[in-house]
Amino acid sequence: MLELILTLPILLILLLAIIEFYLLYANLPRLEAASRAGALTASRISLPSGGSPPSNVIAAVDRQLETLNLPGRQIILLHDTQSGVTKLADGTSYPAPTDLMDHLPTTRNYVRVAVQTPMTGLTPNLLQSLGMDISGRIVSQTTTLRHLDMQLNPPQNPGSP
C-alpha cells in the first residue's frame, strides 16, 4: 500500500504531462494549416505596401483556426512584391519569431505568413501547479510560397467548349 501512495503522484504527473503534450501536438497541424492557407491566398493576390494583411488572407487563416477558440492570434505577412521587404501584421501583438527573416528567397518574389498564438490556446496548462507553467509562451508556424500575382480562378478562353 505504501508503494501505491508513493508512486500515485508520479503517475498522476506523468498522465497530466502526456495529456498536455498530446493536445499541443494534436492542435499544431491546425496552426500549420492556417499558416499554409494564409500564404496560399496571399501568393495569388496583389499585396499592399503597408497597413495590415488583406482581408482575404485574414479570413483564410481564421477559417482554419475557428474551432480552436484561441484567446488571441497574430498574423504576420512578409512579401517583396513592391520594393524591398514589406511586413504587414494583424491581431494581438506578440514578439516576432526569431527565424521570421531567415532564409528569405532572393531569386523570386515571395510571401511568408507566420501565425502566432499563446500555447495555452492549444493545450490546457495542466502542470502549472507543479512548476511547469506554459502561460506566456507563444507558438508560431511559418509558411513561405512564391508570389504568383494571378487570379484564383482565371477566366476561361471564350473560344473553348
Image (cartoon, rainbow, N blue to C red):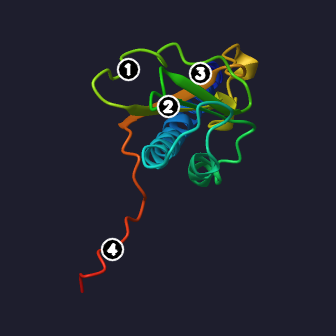
Identify the element where label 2 is drawn: strand
Q: Is residue 1 visible?
A: no
Label 3: which residue?
10
Picture disc at residue 141: 2
Badge 4 amino acid: Gln
Q: Secondary structure at mark 1?
A: loop
Q: Secondary structure at mark 4?
A: loop
- What residue did someone put label 1 on? 104
Disc with the residue nearer the chain's start (3 vs 2): 3
Whether tag 2 and tag 4 are in contact, CB under 8 A, the answer is no
Q: Label 4, on which residue?
A: 156
Percent x, y of residue 16: 61, 31
Circles 4 and 1, Cβ within 8 Å, touching? The answer is no
Q: Tell me the residue at 50%/31% (across/down).
A: 141
Q: Given the current orientation, which residue lies at the most extreme left position?
A: 160
Distance Cα–Cα, label 3 vs label 4 = 65 Å
**Image point 29% across, 75% down: which residue?**
157
Q: Earlier in the sequence, mark 4 or mark 1?
A: 1
Q: Nearer the viewer, residue 5 or 72?
A: 72
Expressed as whole percent of the image width and height from the top left, the position of residue 87 reads: 58, 25
Name the amino acid type tagged 2. Answer: Gln
Q: Residues within 10 Å of mark 4 (few under 14, many from 20)?
A: few
Q: Earlier in the sequence, mark 1 or mark 3?
A: 3
Q: Within 10 angstroms of label 3, few (less than 14), some, or many (20 or more) residues?
A: few
- Quadrant housing residue 23: top right
